Image (spheres, rainbow, N blue to C red):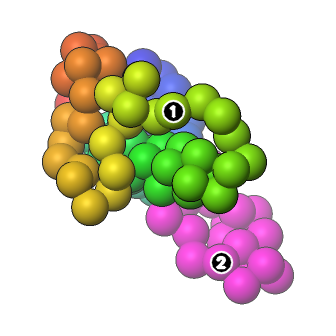
Amino acid sequence: MAKIRDAFQSTVDSKEWAQFCQTKGLEPAAIIGTESDEICAKLESIYAWGLYDAGISTINPADYQIPRIEDFSFPANDRTAAAQAWPE
């Protein structure tokens, strides 16, 4: 995990990535570790419940312990609570 984290950080810090982001109107940022896990869990909540409420998905997010965004706290469920800690 540490090697992946370091490679990701190196890529985000590279001149090539900065140029790519500039052409796409993006701001390069390396969000790694627990902060990234929390952002992804929030997105999971937003997307899963949005698709379910719109009738696009028939899979009830509550069956997978995915909270609605208004009920979100991190860790969001047993899966995220049991995740192995990121290396420092």
- Check disc 1 and report its element: helix, strand or loop: loop
Disc 2 is placed on an element classified as loop
Q: Residue at x 24, y 51 (%)?
A: 72
Q: Is residue 28 visible?
A: yes
Give coordinates of residue 27: x percent, y percent. 57, 77
Q: Nearer the viewer, residue 72 or 40?
A: 72
Total numbered labels placed on residues in the image: 2
Please provide the residue range marked out in magenta: 9-29
Which marked residue is nearer to the observer: mark 1 or mark 2? 1
Badge number at residue 60: 1
* Residue 12 % position (x, y): 57, 56
Q: Is residue 84 left or right of residue 17?
A: left
The correct choice, above or below, for 64 with respect to 9 in the image is above
| Residue that mark 2 sits on | 26
Q: Give the quadrant of the N terminus.
A: top left
Which amino acid lies under the numbered mark 1 shown in the image of this protein?
Answer: Asn
| Quadrant in which the C terminus appears | top left
Query: Is 2 located above or below residue 72 in the figure?
Result: above
Real-space Cα distance between discs 1 and 2? Answer: 34 Å
Q: Which mark is residue 17?
A: none
